[in-house]
Amino acid sequence: MPKLKVEDLEKISEKVKRTMLLREGTGRAKIIVHMGTCGIAAGARNIMTALLKEIEDKDIKDVILTTSSCAGLCSREPMITVEVQGQPPVKYVDLTPEKVREIFAKHVLLGEIVKEYALAFGSERVA
């Protein structure tokens, strides 16, 4: 096995930092794209692509974009959960790339919940 160089260790360190930011990130907002089999079949990949493009085009550095498995509402996919600091999480359902761009602009960037696409407010998690 070849010996690691300092450059190799730096690359590993950067990769771990990026992974930890996605898992435990401290961004102003976190967007979770539900990508279980049902979500993918319903178009979750297009939703993820649209969100990645919005983040890249607007050069956003403080929004965490991640994925999860099925949220248990297969008939309402594709679906995302938006968590903005200081606000309860919001589940958005029956999404299209156009709806996601609107949610990103209004909710993620401005903090205004887009009620017409929202299914639920608050968290089902037990603290």
Image (cartoon, grey):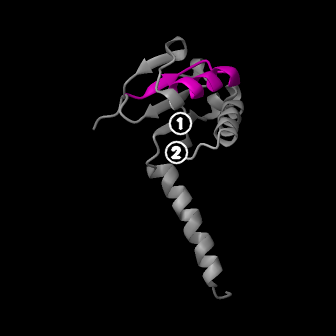
Asked if the magenta segment contains residue 63, the reply would be: no
Q: Which quarter of the picture shows residue 85?
A: top left
**Secondary element at image label 1:** strand
Q: Which mark is residue 76?
A: none
Circle 1: residue type: Ile
Q: Position of residue 91 (x, y in %)?
A: 48, 24
**Rendering quarter of residue 126:** top left
Q: Verify CB contact (< 8 Å) between mark 1 and mark 2.
A: no
**Residue 72 visible:** no
Residue at 67% x, 39% y is 52
Q: Is residue 74 left or right of residue 123?
A: right
Residue sitting nearer the eye, 100 or 92? 100
Q: Quadrant of residue 2?
A: bottom right
Residue found at x 72% / y 31%:
46
Cα distance in 3D space between marks 1 and 2:
14 Å
Query: In this picture, is 15 found above or below 51?
Result: below
Span colored in magenta: 88-107
Q: Secondary structure at mark 2?
A: loop
Q: Earlier in the sequence, mark 1 or mark 2?
A: 1
Q: Position of residue 23 (x, y in %)?
A: 48, 50
Which residue has dot 1 on it? 32
Q: Where is mark 2, residue-wise?
A: 62
| Residue 93 colored in magenta in the image | yes
Q: Amino acid at mark 2?
A: Asp
Across and down, in percent, residue 71 comes to: 50, 29
